[in-house]
Image (cartoon, coloured by chain):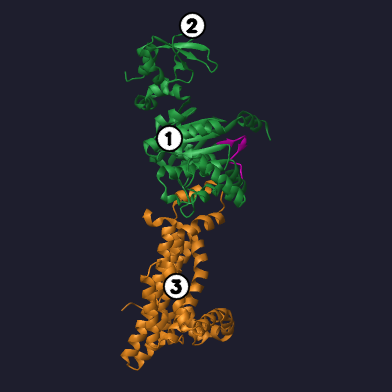
């Protein structure tokens, strides 16, 4: 047995009391602050559910064609979406898709500026990297409980938990992409008298875009992998069907909803990947590597 | 302004670029290493003692307007470091750099950017082109940074693309071009800036010999019509002899010799330079006017112009004993014999 050096009970009690205090006095404030997130999620969800299924199928299949310019990817997307519809999972799938999209959009808005500042300063990178490690390795239930205590069960804690889990790869890949732009090109740009902003938007971001897109792809995938946990605290959607399947020992319900999540993952993974490949080809990195 | 600085500006205003005692030391505490270097230690000793690398060691150069000034040195001699001091891509540890009469080191960050946008353009060994832009947008890049309107800059860019012989490639991606074509884009990008000074860092070193030779000819031609000041870096002595009006030889960050190409070929300052000279085609490097017998001599049967080189007169000696040398007006200013040519070519062979 490891000898007891200090009594950790007061520390634990202080943390628990602190959280209770935060919930009591700041709970409303937090909820108000998170309101825009909820509005975003609601808006996307309402839009997806109000849109007729065939229009969504047509749009996603069309995007798949634009991304790949071949018949293969649109066929996969079409098949995956029809599977969701046939299995009576359409509405749940739209709820899950809304959660994923809202989390991805928020992650993009937050992660890219953070990635940019990391790429520019070693100090910021030293500071942020452990935070990202923590976000990715800390079991999600650990921060799920306090978020539920603060916001109450529902869509907000589900969305926040999803963002916390899904944002780090985008931050990392934005930082990596910006820093691995060919130094010869950066130097040339400097020699022509550019300022840092001109270099960022004129050289670094365009050249790092394939890497950043790979980060967005990772974010969508990780957001989808959170849906079951998110549904435990009231996110609904396909994750909830899986939970119900487990709860009622209905293997078929869990299996179909699970396959539905896989179908969504395939759709978004392949579309973002094809866009990335197309972009690489356009920049000319594909031949270079 | 005190008397000393005004005197210095007087001596340096006529020059395009003047470098005075420029020293660059890479490492965490350059000042300590600098003191050591100034106390007379060699580059190797400084590196052994302090782990600091001496990039440039007390370099002073006078680069006059309108010439192609070549800095020649092997890899690691500090030549790429040197050229980056002119537009302050690298900050010197000590020394002074005056361009067109203005101290570059005194510029604030904003002034430095303005200086880079308007006074100096640069061509890179690895081209440094923007792969996500078309050829014409690459050529127009410098003007875009300067704030020139879209129509005007595209018009200028198109003109320079035509000048370097890339018409028809305006909308291609740079990666689709060959190395020689890419460097033409790099050259057009620098020329489009229409600066008085162009810095070329091993601009032709990545190209294969035939293409390189063509680019060298084109550069000489452009220089004659545009009258720019070109600072050209190379590791290739033949290239230096071919295009340089003046050549500085750099070794271990220090200037070994500065002079006209033939001065270096005919009178190498030390063994290091003689090693280069031994390898070059001297017949191409030496002009007949520098070895000829000057003065009024009887007109020769056959003559060559002033800018003829030894290789041009060699075949003539099969038929003639003397070859006359004419100035630009066509008057004979001297004559040269086969013996003189042979002596000039043989003079610096290993003893």
Q: Which mark is residue A62?
A: 3
Please provide the residue range marked out in magenta: B96-107
- The chain painted green is B
Residue B291 sits in quarter: top left
Helix, strand or loop under label 1:
helix
Q: Which mark is residue B297?
A: 2
Helix, strand or loop under label 2:
loop
Of marks 3 and 1, the one in the foreground: 3
Residue B32, image x, y percentages? 48, 41
Task: State the separation of the CA atoms marked 2 and 1.
Answer: 38 Å
On the rendered image, what quadrant is the C terminus of chain B found in? Answer: top left
- The chain painted orange is A
Q: Is residue B101 magenta?
A: yes
Give the crowd class for mark 3: few <14, some 14-19, many >=20 residues within 10 Å.
Answer: some
Helix, strand or loop under label 3:
helix
Residue B21, image x, y percentages? 53, 33
The number of callouts visible is: 3
Vertical placement of residue A12 versus A270, above or below: below
Badges 2 and 3, same chain: no
Badges 3 and 1, same chain: no
Please state the chain letter of the residue tagged with numbered disc 2 in the rendered image: B
Tell me the residue at 43%/35% (across/down).
B214
On the rendered image, what quadrant is the N terminus of chain B found in? Answer: top right
Pointer 1: what residue?
B214
Q: Is residue A9 magenta?
A: no
Nearer the observer, B251 or B337: B337
Vertical placement of residue A213 versus A283, above or below: below
């Amino acid at each position: 047995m490891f000898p007891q050096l200090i009594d950790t009970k007061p520390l634990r009690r202080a943390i628990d009391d602190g959280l209770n205090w935060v919930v009591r006095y700041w709970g409303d404030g937090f909820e108000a602050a998170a309101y825009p997130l909820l509005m975003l999620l609601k808006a996307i969800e309402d839009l997806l559910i109000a849109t007729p299924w065939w229009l969504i199928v047509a749009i996603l299949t069309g995007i798949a064609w634009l991304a790949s310019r071949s018949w293969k990817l649109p066929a996969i997307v079409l098949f995956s979406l029809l599977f969701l519809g046939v299995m009576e999972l359409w509405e749940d799938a739209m709820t899950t898709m809304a959660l994923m999209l809202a989390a991805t959009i928020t992650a993009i808005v937050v992660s890219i500026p953070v990635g940019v500042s990391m790429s520019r300063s070693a100090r910021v990178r030293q500071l942020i990297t452990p935070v990202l490690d923590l976000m990715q390795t800390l079991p999600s239930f650990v921060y799920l409980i306090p978020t539920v205590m603060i916001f109450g069960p529902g869509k907000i804690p589900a969305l926040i938990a999803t963002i916390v889990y899904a944002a780090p790869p985008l931050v990392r890949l934005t930082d990596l992409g910006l820093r691995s732009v060919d130094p010869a090109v950066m130097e040339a740009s400097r020699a022509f008298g550019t300022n840092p902003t001109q270099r960022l938007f004129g050289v670094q971001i365009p050249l790092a875009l394939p890497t950043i897109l790979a980060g967005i792809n990772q974010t969508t995938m990780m957001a989808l992998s959170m849906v079951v946990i998110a549904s435990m605290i009231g996110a609904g959607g396909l994750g909830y069907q899986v939970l119900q399947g487990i709860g009622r020992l209905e293997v078929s319900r869990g299996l179909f909803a699970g396959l539905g999540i896989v179908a969504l993952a395939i759709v978004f993974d392949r579309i973002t990947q094809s866009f990335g490949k197309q972009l690489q080809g356009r920049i000319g990195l594909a031949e270079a590597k | 302004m005190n008397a000393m600085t005004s005197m210095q500006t007087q001596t340096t205003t006529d020059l395009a670029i003047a470098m005075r005692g420029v020293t660059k030391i890479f490492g965490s505490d350059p000042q300590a290493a600098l003191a050591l270097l100034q106390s007379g230690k060699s580059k190797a000793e400084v590196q052994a003692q302090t782990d600091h690398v001496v990039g440039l060691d007390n370099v002073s150069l006078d680069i006059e307007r309108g010439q192609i000034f070549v800095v020649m040195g092997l890899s690691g001699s500090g030549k790429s470091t040197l050229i980056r001091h002119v537009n302050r891509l690298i900050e010197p540890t000590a020394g002074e750099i005056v361009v067109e009469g203005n101290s570059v080191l005194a510029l604030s960050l904003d002034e430095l950017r303005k200086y880079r946008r308007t006074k100096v353009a640069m061509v890179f060994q690895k081209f440094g082109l923007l792969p996500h832009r078309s050829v014409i947008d690459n050529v127009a890049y410098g003007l875009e940074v300067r704030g020139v309107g879209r129509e005007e800059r595209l018009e200028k860019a198109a003109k320079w693309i035509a000048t370097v012989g890339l018409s028809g490639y305006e909308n291609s991606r740079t990666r689709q071009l060959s190395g020689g074509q890419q460097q033409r884009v790099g050259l057009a990008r620098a020329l489009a800036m229409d600066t008085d000074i162009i810095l070329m860092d091993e601009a032709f070193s990545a190209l294969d010999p035939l293409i390189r030779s063509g680019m060298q000819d084109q550069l000489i031609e452009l220089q004659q019509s545009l009258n720019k000041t070109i600072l050209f870096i190379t590791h290739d002595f033949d290239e230096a002899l071919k295009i340089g009006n003046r050549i500085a030889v750099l070794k271990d960050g220090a200037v070994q010799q500065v002079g006209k190409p033939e001065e270096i070929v005919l009178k190498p300052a030390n063994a290091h330079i003689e090693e280069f000279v031994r390898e070059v085609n001297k017949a191409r490097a030496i002009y007949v006017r520098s070895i000829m017998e000057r003065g009024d001599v009887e007109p020769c049967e056959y003559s060559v112009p002033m800018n003829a080189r030894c290789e041009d007169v060699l075949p003539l000696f099969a038929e003639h004993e003397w070859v006359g040398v004419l100035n630009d007006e066509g008057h004979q200013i001297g004559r040269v014999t086969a013996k003189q040519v042979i002596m000039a070519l043989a003079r610096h062979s290993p003893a």
